[in-house]
Amino acid sequence: MADPRTTLYKEVINLVSRLKAIAPHKLSGPKGLWENGMDIVDVVDIILAVEKKFDVVIPDEVPVYSIDDLVNYLQLRRAS
C-alpha cells in the first residue's frame, strides 16, 4: 500500500505540472515555486486549483512557497 503522503505529493505535483506545463520531475525536491520560474499570479492559480481539487481553503496567512508547503497543509487539514 502506498504511503498517503507520497500519494498526496504525487497528486499535487501532477496538478501543478498540468496547470503550469512544467515537467513533474522539475517540481519535485526542495525547490520553491519561484525557483521554477513562477510568479505570484502562478502561485495564486496553483493555490486556487489545489483548493478546488481537495475541497479546502488555504488561508492567506499560510505560507506556500513549495510543493512541500502545499502537501503539509493538506495533510494537516486531513488530520483534523
Image (cartoon, helix red, strand yellow):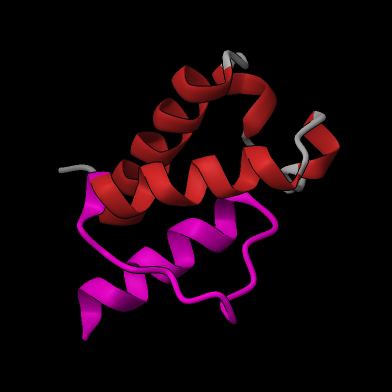
Please tell me which residue is depicted at 22% across the width and 72% down the height of the picture.
78
User: Which residues lie in the magenta part?
Assistant: 53-80
The residue at the far left in this view is: 1
The answer, for residue 64, to whether it is visible in the render is yes
For the C terminus, the quadrant is: bottom left
* Picture mark count: 0
Q: In the image, is residue 10 above or below residue 25?
A: below
Q: In the image, is residue 57 above or below residue 4?
A: below
Displayed quadrant of residue 34: top right
Please tell me which residue is depicted at 42% across the width and 69% down the height of the picture.
58
The residue at the far bottom in this view is: 80
For the N terminus, the quadrant is: top left
Displayed quadrant of residue 55: bottom left
The residue at the far front in this view is: 41
Q: In the image, is residue 80 above or below residue 72?
A: below
Residue 35 is left or right of residue 57, and the answer is right
Residue 49 is left or right of residue 44, and the answer is left
From the top left corner, tell me how far across and down residue 28 is, in percent.
62, 35
From the top left corner, tell me how far across and down residue 8 is, in percent.
32, 47
From the top left corner, tell me how far across and down residue 69 is, in percent.
57, 62
Please tell me which residue is depicted at 40% across the width and 30% down the height of the picture.
15
The answer, for residue 29, to whether it is visible in the render is no
